[in-house]
Amino acid sequence: MKRTKSLAALLMAALMLFALCGTAFASGEASGEASAAVSITGTDVAVDEDYFSGQATETTVSDFTITADNENVTGIYVNGESADDTITIQNGRIELIESGTAISLTGASNVVIDSVVIWNQGNADGISAAGSTVTTVTNSVIYGAQNPETYRRASPFALGLAGSMRVTNAVETSQITYEDSVIVSGSWAALSTDSGTGVVLTARNVLAGVGSLEVAQEGVEYTATKEVNGVTYGFTLGDSANYNSGYVSYCDSGFHNYYYDSQLYGTDYVIILSTSESSATLVNDEMYSDRIGIMWHKNGGGTVDITDGSLHAEYCLFQMKGYSSTDTDGCQANLVVDGTELTVGEGGILLQLMTSDDCGLDYEALQVPEEEDDLSQVECLLGTQVQKTYSDGFPPTTYYVYEVDGEEVGYSADELDTVPEGAVPVMVDYEAQEACTAIFSNLSVEGDVYNGVWEAYQALDVTFDNATITGVISSSYANHVDAEGNVLPGGTVIEADSTLDCHLGMGRLTNTAAAAINNPMYLTLENGAEWVVTGVSYLTKLTVDETSTITATLTVDGVETEITAGTYEGNIVVTPN
């Protein structure tokens, strides 16, 4: 199959890739030796005494201080030559104001960072790990304070963010572990991983969040505190609508990140999982978000596995963003929760599958689809034909396939005006998206579960195993709303950076339970599970074993049916008693 792609489109893709992956660390490897306070490249060591005082050899940087004020300085730059080499950075403090990266790692080496305080201000970054470096950070504090006077958004608006810096980031094939440490970013990201292959981030006994940090003061109330090297630090969660928008951690490109016995506090999200089979394992963590707990977009079959611990979100605990015309990658997310204390704010949502409102990197606005004015008019896609498409490149671009002179040729949306006269769209049978799944075990939770997708046919398959759910579980019409909860008319456009809180519209919905069109809801109750129904719910498939119960009345295809062990399929309506 041929593909047409203009030079302008290629250039735009390259620029967007840099914007997504490189902006926040432009002062890292690129600055290299020329602007580094300490530079270690193989056996070569260079020190700039204008910024550095302490000890530096080819294997150790210790007992040091590094300071720079808006001078785009890399504090310590390491370009290792061999995975057999170990470089230790210990007992030091780095303070950068407005620009630069505190520690930039690349090449191939093992790096140990122990008892280091990074205390940046403004748009300076903390730790950038690239190449094939293997890094362990212990007993350290990494903080990037947000400065409203120099704030500039660098994070993608499409994610519902307005942050300006990633205080840590791991890319390429690097691996990084944080232990017994504090990592706080004023905005965007505390613990981030981005483009690459096989990147692994592990956090053990870590306090990480988005907000502000200080040495704890007596009598001051903090969101959380943690002691590192005999000093107690006080963390205060920020305000997403007041320069502190961000997530704790991001997992991309099929990576698998791990979090153990940690405290994770996000203003917008705790964790975002993106492309390929990006996954996360969380064990005995304390997690909180002012908006959404965990969000998936463009995910291709990854799994979030949560055991024990707790998670609270004010609006939605788990949000999965499925296929849309502006986000054609779709999402096939999987969730497993076992023994975790789950709580959500008043009227909040336990789990939402929605049509993605990701507007893409080249369209900096949230546009409410016209269809949201009356979602009941959406037609079922099963049994229909649609134009053949495929995606290519990064960020992914969708191509629409036409038959041109006997050959199939793909055109991007920007190139449709160049389709030759007489070209015929190639039509194919519609194929449903793979279901998103969730399994909740050994817990009790209050909250609603909704499948609100409409631009693709995709089921949400939920299981409660020895668990109690109190709420609505249903297919739904999902509408975007404003900050007061008023439904936004179709066609409403909210441009990026129009207000400090404009990003909060992403993923902000109200649901109306309704029979499925393209959004079937499957539910399984097993091993003593109980569903206490609080509102009329619409299912397409229901499986109940002999040990589980539903407190409600059941009709299947309009016929009232006694609830006994078995599987029911059709137009299922569950009404509270």
Image: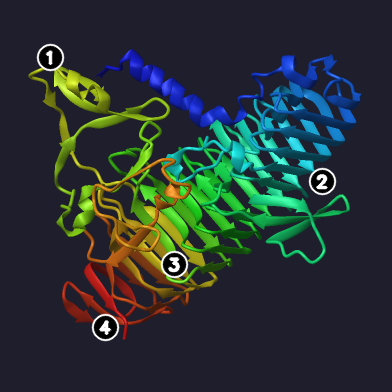
Q: Secondary structure at mark 1?
A: loop
Q: Nearer the viewer, mark 3 or mark 1?
A: 3
Establish if 556 lies above or below 27.
below
Q: Is residue 523 left or right of residue 136?
A: left
Gap between marks 4 and 3, in whole Å?
30 Å
Identify which amino acid the numbered label 4 is placed on: Glu
Given contact means CB atoms under 8 Å apart, are the residues at marks 4 and 3 in contact?
A: no
Q: Earlier in the sequence, mark 4 or mark 2?
A: 2
Name the residue tied to disc 1. 405
Given contact means CB atoms under 8 Å apart, are the residues at marks 2 and 1 in contact?
A: no
Q: Position of residue 569 (x, y in %)?
A: 24, 67
Q: Earlier in the sequence, mark 4 or mark 3?
A: 3
Q: In the image shown, does 484 or 475 lie closer to the viewer?
A: 484
Name the residue tied to disc 4. 562
Identify which amino acid the numbered label 2 is placed on: Asn
Identify which amino acid the numbered label 3 is placed on: Gly
- Location of the C terminus by quadrant is bottom left
Q: Is residue 315 left or right of residue 210?
A: left
Residue lying farthest to the bottom in this orientation: 577
Q: Earlier in the sequence, mark 1 or mark 4?
A: 1
Residue drawn at (22%, 20%) of the image = 409
Name the residue tied to disc 3. 348
Numbered label attached to residue 139: 2
Q: In the image shown, does 359 or 296 lie closer to the viewer?
A: 359
Establish if 257 lies above or below 554.
above
Q: Earlier in the sequence, mark 2 or mark 1?
A: 2
Gap between marks 3 and 2, in whole Å?
37 Å
